[in-house]
Image (cartoon, rainbow, N blue to C red):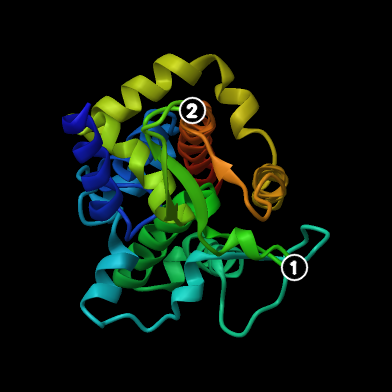
Amino acid sequence: MKKIFLVVAFALVAFGASAWNVTQDEGVVVLATKNLTPEAKSMVEKYLGTSYADDVQYLTNLEKKKAAKHSKEIHYLHLDSSLQPMKVEGDDALASLEKMMEVVRTRNSHSKAEVVTALRTIINLMCDIHNFSYVRIEGVPHSQQEFTFQSYGGDVGKRKTTNKVWWSRFWNAYGGWHVGFSGNLWAEDLELCHGKQREEFAAGSLQEWVSQTAVQASKLYERIKPEYAMTRRERNELEYLNYEMIARAGYRLGKLFNELAK
């Protein structure tokens, strides 16, 4: 038990800088490429090649190098109390996605470097908008702040303890449960679990996908009240929701690339 706890604790620390961990993000891209039209496959490989190690952490790596020209607000979905997108100072995830999509649509009018940047940004932000830790809802402080989690000892018993955690580390911890997974294994696993839902997950527009994420996030945050402590049982149940969102991101990214390649 102690060993398992240490693995999860390591995951909380190691994977706190991005939407999910690196291999989960790679899994999103690999899943997307499995569902590309020949035209879209040619476009993606022309600009990004076939290895995505430099693509999935593009924005985060720029920030780490202090080379980013964007604000960190680029990662976040800002929603008002009715779950509609809000205008914020600087570009948030939705506004940035729409701008980068336009660059790819008009790629013949842009340099290769500009298109590569646009495609990499789209990959990063499609992951971000499906991760609840990047959803900020007006008037809902728990969409941004820490909450209490029962970290050890199960739901009952004398060994039960609590600690503070915040959403990005909470979601990233699930990646630590599959420390041996590569991006390809993530994609295979997601396809096995959610392949029959591919068309359902990919249906709709970018704005509709944002709306669906907002509704799910709002329902999740409703449970976070004063004195609330999330149990391990709840944490385990939310694992399935997290993996579903990764699958949604992958199938939707594939659809987006197919549409942009036309």
Neighbour tally class for label 1: few under 14, some 14-19, many 20 plus, Cα within 10 Å: few
Neighbour tally class for label 2: few under 14, some 14-19, many 20 plus, Cα within 10 Å: some
Nearest the eye: 200 or 259? 200
Q: What residue type is labelled 2?
A: Asp
The answer for how far apart the CA atoms under marks 2 and 1 are is 30 Å
Residue 261 in view in this figure? no
Q: Residue 139 carries which label?
A: 1
Q: Does residue 69 appear left or right of residue 241 in this picture?
A: left
Residue 240, percent from left and from top: 50, 26
Quadrant in which residue 121 is drawn:
bottom left
Nearest the eye: 199 or 217? 217
Q: Mark 2 falls on what kind of element?
A: loop
Would you name the residue on which mark 2 appears? 155
Residue 109, percent from left and from top: 45, 72
Residue 113 in view in this figure? yes
> Where 154 falls versus 67 (above or below)?
above
Closer to the N terminus: mark 2 or mark 1? 1
Residue located 50% across and 26% down the image: 233
Q: Mark 1 falls on what kind of element?
A: loop
Residue 205, percent from left and from top: 68, 46
Q: Which of marks 2 and 1 is in front?
A: 2
Nearest the eye: 238 or 44? 238
Residue 32, percent from left and from top: 41, 36
Residue located 48% across and 53% down the image: 167
Q: Does residue 150 appear left or right of residue 93 in this picture?
A: left
Quadrant in which residue 93 is drawn:
bottom right
Residue located 52% across and 59% down the image: 134
Q: Which amino acid does label 1 sit on?
A: Gly
